[in-house]
Image: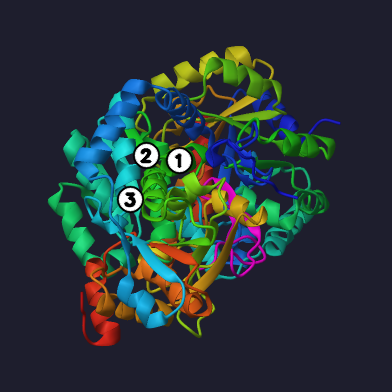
Amino acid sequence: MKSKIKSAFEKCRKEKRPALITYTVAGDNTKKNSLKILSSISKNADILELGFPHNTPIADGGQIQGSSHRSLKNGIKLKDVFQIVKNFKKSNPLKPLILMGYYNLIYQNGENNFLDSCKSSGVDGLIVVDLPWPENKIFSNKCKRKFINFIQLLSPTTSKDRMKKIIKDSHDMIYYISMLSTTGGKLKVSPKNILKNYKKIKKLANNKNLVIGFGITIKTISSLRIADGLVVGSQLCQTITNSIKKRQNPVIKLDKLVYNLKKRII
Amino acid sequence: MTKIKKGIPLIDQHDKSYMYAGKFGGNFIPETLKKPIDDLTKLFSKLRKDKKFLKERDYHFKNYIGAPTPFIKLENLTKHLGGAQIYAKVVSEANGGAHKIYNATVHCLIAKRAGKKYIVGDTGAGYAGKMLSMAAKKFGLKCKIFMGAKDIKRQQPNVKAMRKNGAKIVPVTSGSQTLVDAVSECMRYWVANNDTTNLCVGSTVGPNIFIKICAWSTAQISRELIKQVKEEFGKIPNKLKLLNCVGGGSSAMGFWNEFMDTNAEFIGIEAGGPKKSKLHAAPLTNGSKIGILHGAAQYVVQDEEGQISPTESISAGLDYPGISPLHCFLKDSKRARYVSATDEEALNAYKLVSKLEKISPSLEPSHAFAEAIRIAPRLSSSNVIIVNSCGDSLKDKDIIKSKLGIYVR
């Protein structure tokens, strides 16, 4: 059975453009709005990443920390996250959705229990920030057996040897971290250099869908458009922060932002 | 049943995944940190066997840190309590005033070998930061210290010292604004800057290599102590108790290491927080569940979902929801046991020791003294209690004044 993630990439490839992948935090800025945001941005986004918040993140920058903080303050629990996914999938059954977060929440919930909830709510993939290869071997195999994509990460510090091994254990999608940074850092490497690395990896993983994330905003997205997919996260979180400050509707603001992001890559 | 092997350093008793007893420690880190951590792991395993490096370390431990630190009998306290004989290893006499100088010095020596110009670290009580800034200055490295905004307010003497040493202090305003957030922020900084910068984690916590380096460094304390004990008693006493406060657990690991294969009893004292508070920082005493914090699996104070819980303690250095995986290992194997002392008990212990003796322990070791005061009267004089007095009360002057009205030293 072909995964929805794979189908999304195939569709984009036919349209000769990268897949637009968005990241928002479940429950930001409210449980209701977070669902509304997913529904409205899914018109223009090809794959949705949804963060399940953790209060001690070791790889997130200020913007995503802010979103997670808001969400946790609203009392969001894992069951709410799955509820949001379930409700979203009711009206958007074909749109791929990836959950992203830290391992402790999965560990406390129990790996099998967590994956069962993923399955029953309709989650298509998982990114676990602090469960690198090879530590993730057992869990990623469990995911595979349940037809949930476990998305492996590569970074500029990953050696070629290691890359080959990680790629071998990857599923339909691989995430390349553009630079040494937490999420939302300013792009400190030129798009040209990022793409140079990207092409090197692509040679090792020709049949995989390789996406680039970290530091991508409306300003930089078009310069990276040859990639299979591009992830924008912090700018979305920041837009929610700003719209709350200005008493604007975050749903409308995000809808507009994602529309404009899409425009830059078609 | 979890067991400790004899004759093998505790830090090396992990499996291929760097886990102790198959469940504590490991490297739960973002991909970006895999390589810098691998590099550091390789470099450290080489340096550990490098005679020149060991000579260099010993030279600085002796001439810069001032080894050995004194081992003294607390005659008045012993008489006052009328039971076990009480001794102190006065680690607060080390250069800078606490055990954190060992780890800081070793990290700076490693950073020099790695060709790095910058070093960053976290700090709670401010000791780890103060020592790192001192050592960085001595070894010509630029230094940045991450410290919770709440801790900056309550540990001013150490903050001033760091600034004087030329370190940049980065206030951390996320979460509870204490040590746990400082460690997170510092790790995030390293994720983004590991190409130019070495990280010094301030205790025996974090990804495995940092636990190893830290425990290997503080082991100097027990290398000195085991000699001093043999000199004093002619042998290791049969009924010997080694009491040490534990926050992250670095001083206790160093204090116990050389005694691992002896009969000495290890007692770790965690921060119980204010008397009626439930926000304790005592994951081992209070039966917390295993979770992942700062890259390692350990007993950690957390809620059902896995969110890390806020903690509260009068002592900034112990105010941490997690605990070194090494201590989890010692607990499960029953090699050490762990209890907690409340803020009030620690304050009383500080008061009594400072009044009776020439030493004046900071609020961290005062937790350990509180346990000594509790158990000593019930024990016969053939029992020997040694407390690691790993910090001086001077840094806590303001807190003590506000709680007790006066500060005596």
Q: Which residue is mark 3?
A: B100
The quadrant holding residue B407 is bottom left
Point out residue A259 in the picture as x, y percentages from the top left corner. Answer: 53, 44
**Counting other residues with Cα less than 10 Å from the Cα at mark 3, is it few (<14), some (14-19), or many (20 or more)?**
many
Residue B140 relative to residue A205: left or right: left
Assess whether mark 2 and mark 1 are in contact (beta carbons under 8 angstroms): yes
Which residue appears farthest toward the top when viewing the image? Answer: A203
Between circles 1 and 2, the one closer to the viewer is 1
| Of callouts 3 and 1, the N-terminal one | 3
In this picture, is B98 found above or below A198? Answer: below
Q: Chain of mark 2?
A: B
Q: Which residues are magenta?
A: B284-310
Quadrant into which the C terminus of chain A falls: top right
Q: Which residue is mark 1?
A: B210
Q: Is residue B39 above or below residue B33?
A: above
Q: Chain of mark 3?
A: B
Residue carrying label 2: B199
Q: Chain of mark 1?
A: B
In-front residue for pair A212/B150: B150
Determine the residue positioned at 60% across, 52% down: B330
In the rendered structure, which disc, 3 or 2, sits on the residue that comes first in sequence?
Answer: 3
Q: Is residue A107 left or right of residue A27?
A: right
Q: Is residue A30 above or below residue A147?
A: below
In the structure shown, which secondary structural element does the residue marked by tag 2 occupy?
strand
At x 72%, y 63%, the residue is: A79
Magenta-colored segment: predominant secondary structure: loop
Q: Residue at x 46, y 20 (%)?
A: A195
Residue B147 in the image: x percent, y percent?
Answer: 32, 57
Give the residue type that dot 1 points to. Phe
